[in-house]
Amino acid sequence: LLYTIKFEGEVVYMATGANGANISSSDLQWYFSQVKGNVEEDITDADIISTVQFNHDGEFLATGDKGGRVVIFQKDLGVKGEYSVYSTFQSHEPQFDYLKSLEIEEKINEIQWLKRQNNNLFLLSTNDKTIKLWKVSERRYRMDGFNLYDEYGAQRDVQSINKLRIPRLVPVNELTVEATTKKLYDKAHVYHINSISLNSDDETYLSADDLRINLWHLDSTNECYNVVDIKPANMEELTEVITAAKFHPQHCNYFVYSSSKGTIRLCDMRAQALCDQHAKMFEEQEDSTTKSFFSEIISSISDVKFSSCGRYMVSRDYLTVKLWDLNMDSRPIETYNVHEYLRSKLCSLYENDCIFDKFEVVWGGPSKYPFEKPMQNYLLPYSLLVFLNSLFINIATLVSTLKHSI
């Protein structure tokens, strides 16, 4: 299995390997297998990586940075577990909203791969306001034999043309990878886009900002449908914001969205067009004895993801990772404490605004390494990962050796 660690200005690949089907967590060995980027270079703000995403089969890896660039890596066929640069292109440019006197950063907030249908690659990338659909294709041939231009592209003298030539395709010596914008989805969000999610029908996707969630069709750029709107009539009555939204991996009518209040709402688009009334709400009741000034801040969910089977969800707040069963909305079936030692330092983190940092959480692919503890006769994949302090760590053991080596 190959996982990614994100550091400022570089991408580090981390692999884990072990023998045997029923293996305990202590037998797994984590190690760095590849580092992309020079660690010793001075890192500029534009080079800081903001998002990382594998495609569905793991052959390609896309990274986005604060400079609006997207770098795609491809798995090397000759070297096991290593990736090389496949393509680099500028996805977004800085913009300025003159009506609101607001600068729009070029930073890539999220990348979503579309399932591969042919030799071309398609992906969605978004900054705070604009979503783009990109086509990445290989050019192995070029046109040759034009009548008005020579092989270098210079215009020929018309008087020297004495016969008609038919253009033909000739192979090129070096492979050329081109990235072209196929669709542009904009002017639909008043607030900053925090997440996008592709539907299982491969035709529609969600885009979410702080107060609204829109449903788009990939072929339509001039309209979208508002499926969730939590904006109150009086903004002084606003009590929560949307932090993430994700489609169900198997049922195209289900999606969930999380909020800053620590709740997750499951919506069914078959019930009504505007899903302000949720089908289920997943929330854990807070213990009044442990409530503090920072409780509401650290309970804000920054990310939520479905498992590949669609039965479970995993959510991430500031100090915990929670595993939910869609059939039980009263409490999570498992709670993992993350960086528990920070609980005594929340005051300092609040003063320097680090308490408002957002973290992601991901599921690994299908794995034969389960947790040691089975739950309801279902062995959870051992490759459950949590995005923690800008790197992916296996939460089955929270490997102490890896923690000390960072």
Image (spheres, rainbow, N blue to C red):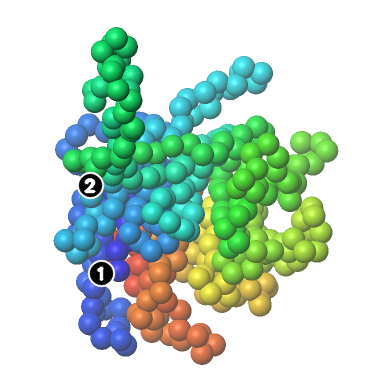
- Up the image or down, 205 lies above or below 354; here it is below
Q: Residues within 10 Å of mark 1 (few under 14, many from 20)?
A: some
Q: Name the disc covering residue 72, or none.
A: none
Q: Say which amino acid is labelled 1.
A: Thr
399 to the left or right of 188: left
Q: Could you say which quadrant of the image residue 384 lies in? A: bottom left
In the rendered image, residue 310, in percent from the top left (x then y), is placed at 57, 72
198 to the left or right of 276: left
In the rendered image, residue 128, in percent from the top left (x then y), is placed at 55, 35
Q: Could you say which quadrant of the image residue 349 lies in? A: top left
- Up the image or down, 309 lies above or below 116; here it is below
Q: Residue at x 49, y 54 (%)?
A: 114
Question: Which quadrant does the C terminus fall into?
Answer: bottom left
Q: Residues within 10 Å of mark 2 (few under 14, many from 20)?
A: some
Q: Residue at x 22, y 31 (%)?
A: 42
- The residue closer to the viewer here, 314 or 292, is 314
- What is the secondary structure assignment of the residue under circle 2? strand
Residue 177 appears in the rendering? no
In the rendered image, residue 116, in percent from the top left (x then y), is placed at 44, 58
Q: Residue at x 28, y 53 (%)?
A: 74
- The residue closer to the viewer here, 120 or 46, is 120
324 to the left or right of 355: right
* Residue to which mark 1 is pinned: 16
In the rendered image, residue 59, in percent from the top left (x then y), is placed at 33, 59
Q: Say which amino acid is labelled 2.
A: Lys
Q: Residue at x 26, y 57 (%)?
A: 75
Q: Name the disc covering residue 36, or none.
A: 2
Question: Which quadrant does the N terminus fall into?
Answer: bottom left
- The residue closer to the viewer here, 307 or 315, is 307
Q: Residue furthest bottom?
A: 377
**Dot placed on the residue nearer the N-terminal end, 1 or 2:** 1
